[in-house]
Amino acid sequence: MARPKSNIDWDYVDLQLRYHCKGTEIAAKFNIHPNTFYRLCEEHYKISYSECLEQKREEGNDLLRSIQFKTAIDGSVPMQIWLGKQYLGQSDKSEISQDIKGKLSINPKEWVKTK
C-alpha cells in the first residue's frame, strides 16, 4: 500500500528556496523523503530541481539586494558604508606611498672591525 499523497504548500516552498533553505530541510517540514521532494518539485516546476533551486535563490538574492539598497536610501549609514565598499570599491584604509629618490649605498671600506 502506498503512502498518502503529501499536501505541499508551494508558496511555502517558493519562500524557503528563496531564503536559501536546503531541500532536505523543506522535505522534513512536510515529513517526506528528500528524493520525493525533489521529484515533486520537478513535477510542479517542470524543470530539474537544481535549476529550480538556482532560480529561486537568484530571486531571493535580488529581493535581498533591493531591501539593502532601500535601507541605504532610507538613511541607514552602516548600510550605505557597506554597499559603498561592496559596489564602489570604497574602503576605510588610507594608503600612503612614498617615493625615495636617490641611491642608498654602504661603502664596505668604512666598516670598522671590532674585537
Image (cartoon, rainbow, N blue to C red):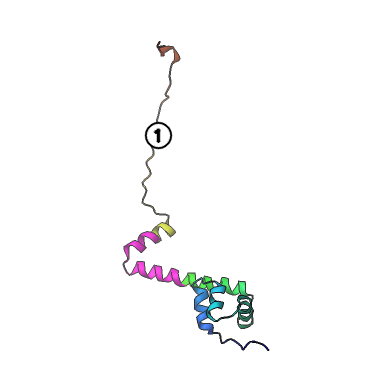
Answer whether residue 69 is magenta in the image: yes
Foreground pick, 115 / 97: 115
Lateral position of residue 68 relative to residue 23, left or right: left
Location of residue 41 by image quarter: bottom right
Residue drawn at x 44%, y 68% is 65
Answer whether residue 1 is magenta in the image: no
Q: Can you identify the residue that label 1 sits on?
A: 99
Name above or below for residue 1 compared with residue 102.
below
Q: Position of residue 12 (x, y in %)?
A: 50, 81
Foreground pick, 13 / 3: 3
For the N terminus, the image quarter is bottom right
Name above or below for residue 100 compared with residue 73.
above
Q: Position of residue 88 (x, y in %)?
A: 42, 57
Name above or below for residue 90 compared with residue 51.
above
Residue drawn at x 54%, y 71% is 22
Q: Give the structural element (helix, strand or loop) at label 1.
A: loop
For the C terminus, the image quarter is top left
Residue drawn at x 54%, y 81% is 30
Q: Position of residue 23 (x, y in %)?
A: 57, 74
Furthest-right residue in this view? 1
Foreground pick, 78 / 113: 113
Location of residue 79 by image quarter: bottom left
Disc tally is: 1
Most common secondary structure along the magenta stretch: helix
* Amino acid type at image mark 1: Asp
Label 1 crowd (10 A; few <14 / some 14-19 / many >=20): few
Residue range in magenta is 63-82
Q: Position of residue 92 (x, y in %)?
A: 36, 51
